[in-house]
Image: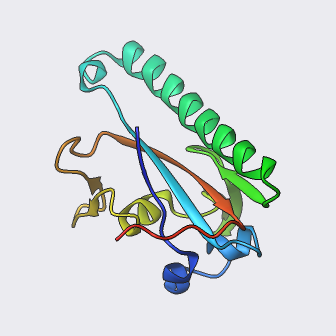
């Protein structure tokens, strides 16, 4: 697992409703957690599904643990799951979007680069990546 923490000010260009401060108005830091997905499961749909579900649970649980530790120090927090989010009206139907774009947050945090195919890639882990995040009122010094 690896992490980075960009300042929420960098998210100024995000669509209204999906900025960290839209989710947690007191947000002063975004902690992005990342983990690599096992490539060995890609050829077996059952193994892939089991591994994917375990990874979603793992990433969400990690965000909750980090949020709980920061909250214990008196700061406000919001764990952002690797899955889920909010339902938004779009083209006559409801569509589900994350509270913030974990992919963009990961790129801003320096964990990878979003390519022309809109996949976030990392030199070591390629594009087999899962992310979660913690929004907090604690102010951390952003990674360079």
Which residue occupies 30% across, 39% down?
Answer: 128
Residue 18 visible in the current orientation: no
- Give the side of residue 89 with respect to residue 57, left or right: right
Q: Quadrant of the N terminus?
A: top left
Task: Tell me residue 64's x, y (percent).
Answer: 68, 40
Q: Is residue 110 above or below residue 40?
A: below
Which residue occupies 51% across, 63% down?
Answer: 101
Residue 98 is drawn in which quadrant? bottom right
| 69 or 104, nearer to the observer | 69
- Which residue appears farthest toward the left when viewing the image? 123
Task: Tell me residue 73's x, y (percent).
Answer: 78, 53
Residue 122 visible in the current orientation: yes
- Give the side of residue 122 with respect to residue 99, left or right: left
Which residue occupies 26% across, 63% down?
Answer: 113
Q: How is the image coloured?
A: rainbow
Which residue occupies 69% across, 75% down?
Answer: 21
Q: Is residue 32 above or below residue 58?
A: below
Task: Tell me residue 39's x, y (percent).
Answer: 25, 26
| 9 or 84, nearer to the observer | 9
- Which residue appears farthest toward the front when viewing the image? 73
| 50 or 136, nearer to the observer | 136
Q: Is residue 106 above or below residue 137?
A: above
Task: Tell me residue 144's x, y (percent).
Answer: 34, 71
Count of number-bearing discs? 0
């Amino acid at each position: 697992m690896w992490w980075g923490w960009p300042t929420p000010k960098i998210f100024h260009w995000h669509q209204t409703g999906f900025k960290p401060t839209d989710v947690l108005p007191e947000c002063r830091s975004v902690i992005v957690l990342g983990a690599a997905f096992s490539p060995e499961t890609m050829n077996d749909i059952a193994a892939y599904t089991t591994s994917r579900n375990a990874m979603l649970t793992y990433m969400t649980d990690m965000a909750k643990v980090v949020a709980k530790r920061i909250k214990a120090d008196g700061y406000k927090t919001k764990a952002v799951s690797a899955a889920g989010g909010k339902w938004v009206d779009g083209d006559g139907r409801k569509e589900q979007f994350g509270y913030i774009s974990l992919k963009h947050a990961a790129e801003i945090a320096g964990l990878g680069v979003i390519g022309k195919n809109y996949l976030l890639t990392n030199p070591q882990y390629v594009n087999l990546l899962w992310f979660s995040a913690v929004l907090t009122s604690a102010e951390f010094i952003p990674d360079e």
